[in-house]
Amino acid sequence: MIIKNILAAIGAFFVIIIALVIVLVLFKSGRSDKVVVVRLDGVITDSAEISEKLRELRDEDDVKAVVIRIDSPGGAVGPSQEIYSEIKRLSKTKKVVASLGALAASGGYYAAVAANKIVANPGTLTGSIGVIVQFINAEGLLSKVGIKGHTVKSGAFKDVGSPFREIKPEETAYMQAVINDVNNQFIKAVAEGRGMKTEDVEKLADGRVFTGAEAKTKGLVDSLGDLTDAVELGAKLAGITGKPHVIYPEKKGLGVLKTVFGESVSEGVFGLFSGARIMYMAP
C-alpha cells in the first residue's frame, strides 16, 4: 500500500512538472516578439478600421514591428492623411515597414511615407504624387429628357462642381487654389518622410506613376523586395533574433462590387453627383 502511494505521488509530481512545462511553453510562444501584418487595400474612402487597428498595436508590448501591406490606388484626401498620421504615431514606438504590392499610388503612397522603411517590388506601380478633382456636367443629357436643375445657395461658390451647369472660370481658379494647397501638403509629407528636399519632390509631383525599380532610384522607396522581405526587414529593425512570430490579418469576405470598386455602388453613384471630391488618387 505504501509503495502504491509513493508511485502515485511520483506520477502526480511528473504530471505537474509536464503541465508546468506546457504552460511555460505556451506562455513564451504567446509573448514572443511578434511582427504584425496590416493590410491597406482598395480605394481609400474611410480610415476608421485601419486606424483603430494601428492604435491597438501601439499598446501591445509583444508586437515589435508592423508591416503595412499596401495595395491601393489612393482615395479621399482626409482618410489618406488620417492613416498617414496613425502610421507616423505608431512608428515612434514600433518599427514600421511599408510593403508595396501591385499598386501603391497617390493616397496609398502618402500613407507609406510615414513608415520607417518602404519596400517595393520591382514592378510595383507607385508614386502618382498629386491631387485630382473631377466634375460631371450632365446638363446636356438632362435637358434631353426634360430635366432642369434649380439651385438656391448662400454663397457664390456653394455649388461648385454642380452637375447641372458648366463650371465658371472663377470657380476653376478657386478649385485650383484648393488643389494646390492640398498638393503642397502631399509634397511636404513625402519630403519629411523620405528625407528629401521639397524642390526634389516637386519635380516628381506631376501625377506620374513609377515602377518600384524607378522609385528606388528616385529615393521614393528604400529597397526592392516582396512581403517576406518586408517582414524580415521589420524583424531586423526591431532587433528580433531568430525567426519572428508573424501575425497575418484574417481574410474577410467582400462583395464583388466592393472588391472591384472599393466602395458600394450607392456610394459611387452618389459621389458622381455630389460635387467636388478632392482625391489623392491614381488615374
Image (spheres, grey):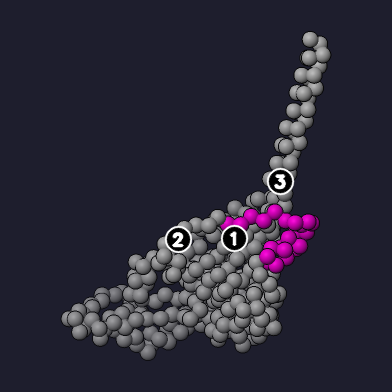
Residue under label 2, please give it.
254
Q: For the residues marked 3 and 2, what is the alpha-carbon distance in whole angstroms?
A: 32 Å
Question: Helix, strand or loop at disc 1?
Answer: strand
Q: Which of marks 1 and 2 is nearer the N terminus?
A: 1
Name the residue rendered at 48%, 72% in the picture: 75
Q: Which residue is drawn at 42% across and 87% down?
A: 173
Give whichever of 199, 101 is nearer the camera: 101
The number of numbered badges drawn on the structure is 3
Q: Where is residue 29 in the image (x, y as percent from the top left)?
A: 71, 46
Q: How crowded is mark 3: few (under 14 residues within 10 Å), some or many (20 or more)?
A: few
Q: How crowded is mark 1: few (under 14 residues within 10 Å), some or many (20 or more)?
A: many
Please give the residue where the numbered disc 1 appears in the rendered image: 38
Disc 2 on helix, strand or loop? loop
Q: What residue type is labelled 3?
A: Ser
Judge whether residue 93 is colored magenta: no
- Asked if the magenta segment contains residue 233, the reply would be yes
- Give the residues in magenta: 228-249
Q: Where is residue 134 in the image (x, y as percent from the top left)?
A: 41, 81
Helix, strand or loop at label 3? It is helix
| Residue 37: percent from left, percent from top | 62, 60
Q: What residue type is labelled 1?
A: Val
Disc 2 marks a residue whose amino acid type is Leu
Q: Quadrant of the N terminus?
A: top right
> CA gap, disc 3 to disc 1?
21 Å
